[in-house]
Amino acid sequence: MIDDWPTAADIERYAAEHGLAFEDITRDIVRIASIAHLAGKGVLNDRFVLVGGMALRLRGSNRFTIKDTDSSLDGVLDEIAFAGDLGMEEPALEIYPDDGTNWKRKTPKLVDIKPIAYNAYFASATDEPVQGEFSFTVSTRGLMRPADWLVLRHPYPELVLQDDQLLVPVMNIAEQAAEKVVAWAAHSLVKHYLDLAWIGERVGSTMNREDLQKLVQAKLDVGYATYPDSYAKLRSLQDLILPLSKPRDHTGPLGRAGDQGFGAVRFMGPKRSYDEARALVVGQIIPALFDLRQPTRG
């Protein structure tokens, strides 16, 4: 699916331009190539979509995802078949997924496929490849809205896809907003809050409140069914007001204090401060989810 690859010199230039490490840029290009590979084979489809930071990047987000490619499958994952689909053997790039022995099955509905090792010959200035690993997370909690199909955009001019308009399925933006609301409330990882802010800035004012409420409640219900003890205090929409409005005071039942980890979040371009993110969540996401003129109800 790739016509041309960046060289080691190109990657050095990308790293300098974006203030990122050579290894991180190389891994990112490998992950983009793997997505093109899966899309070209038809593995990614209306029932198997990208989610998380990579999906938002295809919409224009500049948060730089480091190691994981997140996805959601409406069905049962055929682990053996998918491990085979992930594999690649090209002159410029070889990808070798672990056979499943070390995969982390975090819940009955979430598999973290790792390590996925690669030999990136394109990134090397010698005959020896640049080696590394990434992971591919598959959630099988299902999809609640039809997928959106977006062009596989990326910021690397020398990475030339055979089809420069290659379409990739990603989770519907309203459903992804609902996932981020619940993920923030449950895990209090700052990347989820920053993604919510980006969604709020882009589409918050156009979201249908009733639809978003249904999606969020459905995600809360799935969480409760999976972690009944941890989600005991995350059962209704009203339980989300404080986590969304006071992020620095929030510690999710499955995560840590909300203001930790901000320094680890990386961007390709301007960074967003915590206070800027809170202003967008309070100004866009909360009004999209709640009718502020009426008492909030679960």
Image: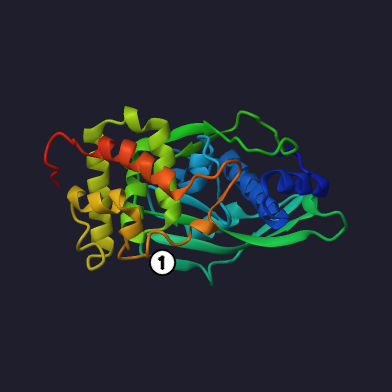
Q: Position of residue 131 (x, y in %)?
A: 73, 62
* Observer able to see residue 196: yes
Q: Is residue 208 above or below residue 31?
A: above
Residue visible at 20% across and 63% down?
Answer: 232
Q: Image quadrant of residue 39?
A: top right
Between residues 298 and 121, which one lies in front from this camera angle?
298
Q: Residues within 10 Å of mark 1 (few under 14, many from 20)?
A: few
Q: Is residue 217 above or below residue 149?
A: below
Residue visible at 28% across and 40% down?
Answer: 286
How many labels, in total?
1
Q: Position of residue 295 (x, y in %)?
A: 11, 41
Q: Is residue 1 above or below residue 8?
A: above
Q: Amino acid at mark 1?
A: Lys
The residue at which mark 1 appears reads as 106
Between residues 72 and 76, which one lies in front from this camera angle?
72
For this orientation, the residue located farthest to the right is: 126
Q: Position of residue 187 (x, y in %)?
A: 36, 60
Left or right, residue 270 beside residue 56:
right
Residue visible at 20% across and 53% down?
Answer: 239
Between residues 8 and 202, which one lies in front from this camera angle?
202
* Observer able to see residue 72: no
Q: Position of residue 9 (x, y in %)?
A: 82, 47
Considering the numbered disc 1 on the image, is that residue within a helix, a strand or a loop?
A: strand
What's the colour scheme?
rainbow
Q: Image quadrant of residue 144?
A: top left
On-image quarter of the N terminus? top right
For this orientation, the residue located farthest to the front is: 275
Between residues 180 and 218, which one lies in front from this camera angle?
180
